[in-house]
Image (tube, rainbow, N blue to C red):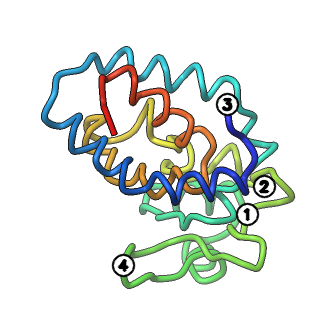
Amino acid sequence: MVTDLVQIKRFGEKSREENQQLRAWMKRHSFAERRLKTIAEDIQDQIDCTACANCCRVATTPVTDRDADRLARFLGAKLPEFLRDYTEESEEEGRILKRNANGCVFLDGNLCSVYAARPQTCEQFPHLTKGNGSLLSRMWHMADRAVYCPIVFNTLEAWKPETGFKK
């Protein structure tokens, strides 16, 4: 199991094209999604996200209307104030949480200061065991996430022999 973030970045970049090919290969072949989710859960259970928090440092966080309402209530702010102070519009992604030099505006060390009310995308991250749509539909982003998330990197590596994928 690789957990060192420098190695994850290096190995993830080196495997990016291969990981994209894995998704295409999986799309053309049958596999037991339940088995793949079990593998992902096992890996997720072995990695302490609070020791890493790299997703909060690297990735942007889309915010739905429902997320914004929940976060505003949690912070005791009016919705317009919350939107002004904690979100911004991204041309590519729509409304996202603001970021500072450390990453997400709500990242405090390695912990989320709004964890109880965090956006749905954060709750479902890394989207291997839960998320909207099928596992294959969520695979579009996994090659990118394997560059910064130890759970995604190790899961994709474990899925390759499980699915019969050959480089």
Tell me, for residue 1, which label it has, or none. Answer: 3
Tell me, for residue 92, which label it has, or none. Answer: 4
Q: Amino acid at mark 2?
A: Ser
Label 4, label 2: how far apart the Cα atoms are = 26 Å
Q: Amino acid at mark 1?
A: Phe
Residue 107 position in % (x across, y down): 76, 61
- Element type where label 3 sits in the image: loop
Q: Which badge, 2 or 3, comes first in the chain's sequence?
A: 3
Q: Which residue is mark 1?
A: 106
Q: Amino acid at mark 3?
A: Met
Mark in front: 4 vs 2:
4
Label tally = 4
Label 3, label 4: how far apart the Cα atoms are = 33 Å
Q: Which badge, 4 or 1, comes first in the chain's sequence?
A: 4
Q: Which badge, 4 or 2, comes first in the chain's sequence?
A: 4
Q: Is 77 rendered above or below residue 18?
A: below
